[in-house]
Amino acid sequence: MADFLAMGGYAQFVWSAFGFWLLCLIFNMVSARRKIRISLERATMAAARQRHRLARKAKQKHDA
């Protein structure tokens, strides 16, 4: 097992590459989730604004 972990003397390069890959993977996942959350919030706010505009327009039409 120790021989495997030593990677023939290249362990520092191999394991640092795996570590960097893992950090990039985690960053990518967190970034994607954040962008999806922001997009959903924006879409929800836009839908609420549209409903408000339509309700105001219907009220104006009803009052006239």
Image: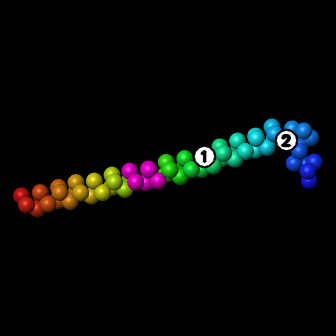
> Most prominent secondary structure in the magenta stretch?
helix
**Mark 1 Cα within 10 Å, few/some/many (few <14, many 20+)?**
few
| 43 magenta-colored | no
> What secondary structure is found at the residue carrying circle 2?
helix
Q: Which of 51 and 23 is in front in this view?
A: 23
Q: Which quadrant of the structure image shows residue 54?
A: bottom left
Q: Which quadrant of the structure image shows residue 9?
A: top right
Range shown magenta: 37-42
How far across and how far down the image is residue 4, in percent?
Answer: 90, 49
First in sequence: mark 1 or mark 2?
Answer: 2
Q: Tell me, what colour scheme is on the image? A: rainbow
Residue drawn at the location 6% of the way across and 58% of the way down: 64
Residue type highlighted by circle 1: Phe
Q: Whole-Å distance between the Cαs marked 1 and 2?
A: 24 Å
| 40 magenta-colored | yes
Q: Nearer the viewer, residue 25 or 44?
A: 25
Q: Which of 23 and 59 is in front in this view?
A: 23
The residue under label 2 is: 11
> What secondary structure is found at the residue carrying circle 1?
helix
Residue type highlighted by circle 2: Ala
Residues at marks 1 and 2 touching, judged by CB atoms closer than 8 Å: no
How far across and how far down the image is residue 26, in percent?
Answer: 63, 49
Residue drawn at the location 44% of the way across and 50% of the way down: 38
Residue drawn at the location 37% of the way across and 56% of the way down: 44
**Mark 2 Cα within 10 Å, few/some/many (few <14, many 20+)?**
some
The residue under label 1 is: 27
63 w.r.t. 8: above or below: below
Q: Mark on residue 43? A: none
- On the picture, is 41 further left or further right than 19? left
Instruction: From the image, state whether disc 1 or disc 2 is nearer to you.
Output: 2
- On the picture, is 23 further left or further right than 14? left
